Amino acid sequence: MSQKTASKYDQDRQLIATRGKIEDAHGNIIAEDSNVYNLFAVIDPSHLSDDGKPLYVKDKAKTAKILARYIPLSEKKIYAVLTPKKTKPYQVEFGNAGKSISLDIKKKIDAQKLPGIFFTKTPSRLYPNGTFAANVVGLAQTDMSKNSAQGSLKGVMGIEAYFNNILTGKNGYSQFKTDSFGYELPNTRKTLKQPKNGQDIQLTLDARLQSYMESVIGEVAQKYQPVSMTATLMDPSTGKILAATQRPTFNPSTKVGLDSSWRNALVQDTYEPGSVMKILSLSASIDSGRYTPNAYYTSGAVNVGGSVIRDWNITGWGSIPYSEAFPRSSNVGFVKIEQQMGAPIWKKYLNRFGIGQKTNVQLPGESAGSVAFKQPVDQAITAFGQGVNVNTMQMMQAFSAIANNGTMVKPQIVAAITDPNTGKTNKTQKTVVGHPITKSTAEQVRDAMKDVVNKTYGTGMVYSVPGYEIGVKTGTAQIAQNGQYLTGDSNYIFSVVGMAPIDHPKYMLYITMRQPQKMTAAPEQILASAFNPILQRALEYNNGTSVSNVKTTAMPNLAGKSVAAASKLLETTGLTYSLVGSGDKVVQQLPLAQENVLAGQRAVLLTNGAMTMPDITGWSKNDVLKLAEISGIKIKFKGDGYVVKQSIAKNHLLNSSSNLEVQLASKKTE
């Protein structure tokens, strides 16, 4: 247009609503809105300004050299992108290296005044805690569907998906007139409708317990390589889930691991629970008046409809009282207990406990499971957890009746929903879903769970927690595949559920582990290495005691703070820190906010710049594992102790496909 006129143009501008925040039980941010930028370069020489100045990349070598300082791509590769040989495109992009760039890095690139370098702004979701109940919290991504508002986010899994409509809010708009230059004309009519921001969701998760669980389960999973693993900690009196995780999992900030852990194993995956089911069959037997604890039976093997069912100890223990069947985890004993009840009574209690029924917990895609109950042998083996498929939340709900003196409560993930537009908060109330057994029955079953830990013949002696009286039940479930059960020492789902303090349970912890690929210890030892410290940490928090005699402090919340401010804050708390990245703003941290940490402990901080390798000389193995979790890189350890050698040099650019080899030695390098 050679001569621009002052013609009036109608303009509609969409005002995007802010997606609601997700917080933990103490108000710590788990997910919130942010903006990122995607980098592109115009390389067509015809792109000029009105006064003829180049708006394309003219000096490609210089541009490549400067961009390499800010994005995780080498100068050579950037130059190759800027100089395509086979085609002559108008503009080029830089793949993942040029996507999701922070505002801080964008400003630094803009300051270089590179002709032809441009950005597009994209809304994104910030998850400052990384791998933090990731499959529960879920993920929100840019909605690319035709009907979606430009730049809107949509929950695609977990809480983000289940409550998507509540979190999303409603976009507004602005209508006004402009001249041909795009400037708003004065004294013309303007229509404005403000956006209605999405509602904020507070979860029942406790960041202190959740972060500790992530650390413990992550280390156990890395060491023993199970095909899958879950851990769930609940307050049985309210149904509140205080911590929950699974392996494999993913980091919502980096998306590392997302391809292999899209499902929420706590509700979507069903499995045969094994002997933890004996908690329910013992409850049913006692409650129905059919239990004869002082009567004797012959252990070892029993024939049901032509099928021989054996105890895990194939030779059995001779003639023993039924009172020992539970702590010894005798399958034969529980077949006989089921037969004494009769199938109709046992099925009635399975229904009362909600087995085969959805809990309708606040997570998407829940599977109801199933119960095989046609033949006598099917009915018998359900008593010890075979021939029945459940999900983790079903078991937590059923177990709550035993912990809660007969009152069964629904598991609860969401504590409250707040509308920031009105300030109104709706708190989630405890939901009682049944009273399958009496208080007396529940007390007797908890006493039996104590025997599993305290009796010399109990299968759970390894799960004792010093200073606390707890009760547990162990489980070893065969895995059905192609119509038959797998064989082999590791081809089982190993599990343990515990309650503490057992007389008035405040916490209930349930851990499952499927097929450990490196079973270098007994399965109960592996599970105990996770179960004991997690339950002990919860009990100590409940009592208000320190986790040790060493002075501890609460890890401050550093997400969103400048590196300078974070540094000062850590100095006042007596903590050291290391940076991963070239930016000046903290976007993720380990340990997580509010986690109890020891004086002198190392914090690993991920910044908004390009991810770069720190010098890890002298780091402990635990510190290196923090680096792996926060960056998504793969690590191979050699030796034990502290780091003396690293395969990736300091300041080298990192990405999720990086592989780091670390040499450890027993003496710490100063």
Image (cartoon, rainbow, N blue to C red):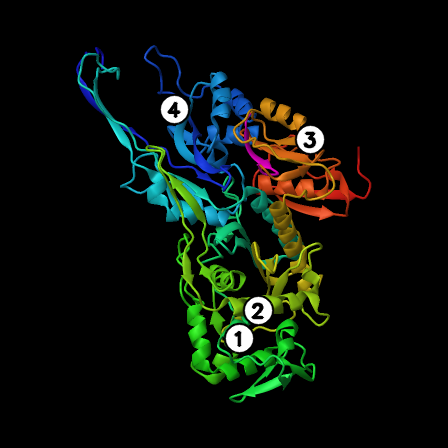
Circle 3/circle 1 CB separation < 8 Å: no
Tell me which amino acid carries mark 2. Answer: Val
Q: Which residue is mark 2?
A: 445
In this rendering, position of residue 622 left or right of residue 293: right
Q: Nearer the viewer, residue 10 or 292?
A: 292
**Between discs 3 and 1, the one toward the N terminus:** 1
Instruction: Tell me if I can see residue 371 in this picture.
Output: no
Q: Which residue corresponds to the image point at 42% horizontal and 69% vertical from the top-left?
A: 352
Q: Which residue, given by chain and number where applicable, does mark 4 sit on?
A: 44
Ranked by sequence position, the earlier of labels 4 and 1 is 4
The magenta stretch is 585-593
Q: Residue at x 45, y 52 (%)?
A: 412
Between disc 4 and disc 1, the foreground one is 1
- Is tag 2's residue or tag 4's residue first in the polypeptide sequence? 4
Cβ atoms under marks 4 and 3 closer than 8 Å: no
Regarding mark 1 in the picture, which secondary structure is present there? helix
Q: Amino acid at mark 1?
A: Ile
Instruction: Decide whether residue 591 is among the magenta residues.
Output: yes
* Mark 2 residue crowding within 10 angstroms, few (<14) / some (14–19) / many (20+): many
- The residue under label 3 is which amino acid type? Thr
Residue in front for this viewpoint, 581 or 381: 381
Residue mark closest to the camera, 3 vs 1: 1
> Vertically, is 355 above or below 5?
below
Q: Indicate whether 505 appears above or below 86.
A: below
Label 2: which secondary element? helix
Reading the image, the residue beneath label 1 is: 286
Image vertical order of residue 243 relative to residue 100, above or below: below
Residues under labels 3 and 1: Cα distance? 56 Å
- Give the quarter of the figure containing the N terminus: top left
Q: Which of the marked residues, 2 or 1, is nearer the chain's N terminus?
A: 1
Query: Separation of disc 2 and disc 4 at Cα?
Result: 77 Å
Q: Are marks 2 and 1 in contact (CB under 8 Å)?
A: yes
